[in-house]
Amino acid sequence: MAPGGTAVKAEPHSDIPTRPKRPVDLVHLAKQCLGDEALELEVLRLFDTTLKDYFGRLKLASSFDDLSLVLHSIKGAAGGVGAWAVADLAKVMEHEIRSGRPLTHERIEDLGLAVEDVRSFIGRMVANEAV
């Protein structure tokens, strides 16, 4: 109880780190690029191309090995730049297929939404730099 007899509401304690709300964690990216803004933009451009290519491969993959390799590649690339939603979803999907669960069209579309969100964000970042 607080002074005056009012109850004190305890804040929930969580050991789970919260992820940034942006599609790309720009603080993480800046650390990865040692604060070099030109390098950050170049990394984002390359990641955009990589993400587009690997997501296209994912939609065409049919074997377990292909699916696993593509999801692992997406997870690693996304984690490198701080695209946490994409990295986390690819990680879950990779675990699901390794556990024997089929990769559904709906699940691929879920990842597609996250991919488009990141690619749109990168497009705006690059366009703002060109202005």
Image (cartoon, helix red, strand yellow):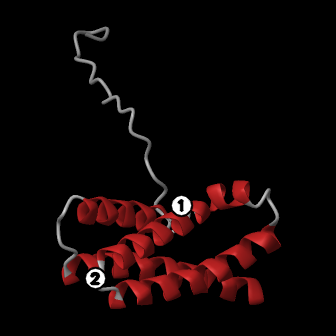
Q: Position of residue 74 (x, y in %)?
A: 48, 72
For the residue pair 62 and 109, the one nearer the viewer reads as: 62
> Amino acid type of disc 2?
Glu
Residue at 52% in and 81% down = 51
Q: Is residue 131 visible?
A: no
For the residue pair 1 and 125, the one nearer the viewer reads as: 125
Quarter of image, res 55? bottom left
> Amino acid type of disc 1?
Gly
For the residue pair 23 and 53, the one nearer the viewer reads as: 53
Earlier-in-chain disc, 2 versus 1: 1
Residue at 30% in and 74% down = 64
On the rendered structure, is 17 left or right of 29?
left
The residue that mark 1 highlights is: 79
- Which image quarter is the N terminus in? top left
Quarter of image, res 72? bottom left
Cα distance in 3D space between marks 2 and 1: 20 Å
Element under label 2?
Answer: helix
Residue at 43% in and 76% down = 70
Residue at 66% in and 61% down = 29
The residue that mark 2 highlights is: 109
